Image (cartoon, rainbow, N blue to C red):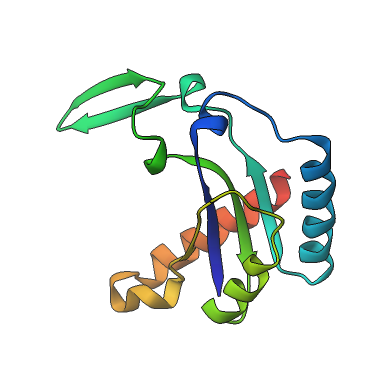
């Protein structure tokens, strides 16, 4: 099972306050454990929403909304992409993360091809597999 682990933004992350060296050190060790265990597929921190934009789709119209965005509790400050056996395993890994101070982190399973049943035709499955193979070659 693949899952996205979403680190929620807070007032500090939205203000661009960077973690101190101690947290970088602890997070580096934690990430090394995840990689050695074959759990971590990807992960990174995101710049504050003031550095970003949103695009709203309404029919053929596209509206660009520049950051910052008001609701920091709805924003993402960072993420991991993990490969685990179950949600319970992801929770156990996350409990070991070096967070404190009320940090909130969400775990969301990704859809897999088999979740779509007959809706995902053999042609569409093949296209998806080709694209994933290309992505692997691009990194």
Residue at 69 percent across and 30 percent down: it is 18
Question: In the image, what residue occupies the spot 80% across and 72% down?
Answer: 37
In the image, residue 33 above or below residue 46: below
Q: Is residue 80 left or right of residue 63?
A: right
In the rendered image, the vertical position of residue 137 relative to residue 37, given as above or below: above
Residue 72 drawn at (x, y percent): 41, 35
Instruction: Name the spot of residue 101 as percent of width and height, x first.
Output: 59, 48
- Quadrant for the C terminus, please: top right
Residue drawn at point x = 41 percent, y = 21 percent: 68
Query: Which residue lies most toward the left here?
Result: 59
Q: Is residue 37 above or below residue 65?
A: below
Picture quadrant of residue 3:
bottom right
Q: Could you tell me residue 2's position as x and y percent?
A: 56, 68
Instruction: Please give the name of the residue rendered at 72% of the width and 56% of the height, measured from the top-left corner.
Output: 98
Say whether residue 55 is left or right of residue 93.
Answer: left
x then y, percent, for residue 137: 72, 49
Q: Nearer the viewer, residue 59 or 69?
A: 69
Depth check, front residue: 115 or 119: 115
Quadrant in which residue 31 is drawn? bottom right
In screen coordinates, is 73 left or right of 137?
left
């Amino acid at each position: 099972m693949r899952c996205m682990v979403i680190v929620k933004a807070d007032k500090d992350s939205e203000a661009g306050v960077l973690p101190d060296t101690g947290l970088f050190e602890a997070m580096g060790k934690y990430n090394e454990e995840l990689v050695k265990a074959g759990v971590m597929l990807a992960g990174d921190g995101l710049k504050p929403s003031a550095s970003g934009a949103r695009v709203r789709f309404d029919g053929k119209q596209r509206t660009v909304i520049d950051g910052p965005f008001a609701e920091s509790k709805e924003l993402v400050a960072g993420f991991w992409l993990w490969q685990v056996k179950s949600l319970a395993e992801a929770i156990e890994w996350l409990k070991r993360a070096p967070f404190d101070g009320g940090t909130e982190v969400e775990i969301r399973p990704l859809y897999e091809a088999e979740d779509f049943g007959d809706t995902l035709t053999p042609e569409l499955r093949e296209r998806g597999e080709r694209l994933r193979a290309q992505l692997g070659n691009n990194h």
